[in-house]
Amino acid sequence: MTRQKSVKPRLSRRIGNFTGDRRALLLLVTIGLLLAGRAWLADHPEHNPWAPLDLRDPVGWATETKLLALRDDVAECRAVLDRSGIAHDVLEPAGEGACRREDRIRLNSLPLSPRTPPVTCPASIALLLWERDVLNPLAVDIFGSKISRIEHLGAYSCRRLYGRDTGPWSEHASANAIDIAGFVLDNGTRINVLRDWPGESEKARFLRLARDGACESFATVLSPDYNAAHADHFHLDMSPRWRGVCR
């Protein structure tokens, strides 16, 4: 009697021989990458577009997008200040018509002189980041001393662009801008935009790098390179109309 050999299904001994194997492997790899990515983002919220903005976190891939979004969301902007532990005063609205200022914040920790003026919440955050992440490191690197005072020419001015009778209103009309004229360091060094911008001195280098660094936080930065009207100051604003004007 002839014994018949049983026939067993032949299974792949090497993953990848069958389409199903490849799909399963791809799925496992994808799940692994997603889990690893989720864990990495949890440890690096500055790169996570879904993580709430905290100004104590380092600047990351998602920081700029989050900062820009604050220009149209006053409530979230103020929540960021609270979340970040930034002491601030929320002032009552003031003014009328086009010069009505609904959003008025004062950060008393900023070394502005004369006394820190109230500006919009987004402008306050931009000033804070500029002073902390640009001005102080620059001053220490070039002059060996931190910033003691940031001298300004004002924030609020109820006027149209360039003081014209018609046309768009200036960002100063809503205190969404500030004009910076100079700096004083802890060691007594004085840096003035009008006097020190020309030339190749260390003060001129500081001013140019300070201008460039402001462009990382503010929507609009205008310096003496822009026109004669800005020969004595930097104009910094958080206009919601555009991003990246840096002259």
Image (cartoon, helix red, strand yellow):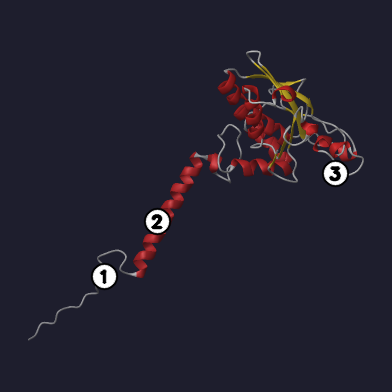
| Nearer-the-camera pick, 59 or 231 | 231
Image position of 2 with respect to 9: above or below? below
Quadrant of the drawing holding the C terminus: top right
**Which-is-in-front pick, marks 3 and 1?**
3
| First-in-chain label (3 vs 1) | 1
Image position of 98 with respect to 157: above or below? below
Q: Which residue was labeled with disc 2?
A: 29
Label 3: how many residues lie within 10 Å, few (<14), some (14-19) or many (20+)? few
How far apart marks 3 and 2 lie (CA) works out to 55 Å
Q: Give residue 217's position: percent from left, percent from top.
A: 66, 36
Q: Give residue 16's position: percent from left, percent from top.
A: 32, 65
Q: Which residue was labeled with disc 3?
A: 168
Residue at horizontal 59 percent and vertical 19 percent from the top: 143
Label 1: how many residues lie within 10 Å, few (<14), some (14-19) or many (20+)? few
Whether residue 104 appears in this view of the structure is no
Residue at horizontal 82 percent and vertical 36 percent from the top: 174
**Which structural element holds mark 1?**
loop
Residue at horizontal 63 percent and vertical 33 percent from the top: 213
Q: Amino acid at mark 1?
A: Leu
**Which structural element holds mark 2?**
helix
Residue 11's label in the rendered image is 1
**Which structural element holds mark 3?**
loop
- CB contact under 8 Å: marks 3 and 2: no
Q: Amino acid at mark 3?
A: Pro
Residue at horizontal 56 percent and vertical 43 percent from the top: 61
User: To which quarter of the image does residue 151 belong?
Assistant: top right
Label 2: how many residues lie within 10 Å, few (<14), some (14-19) or many (20+)? few
| First-in-chain label (2 vs 1) | 1
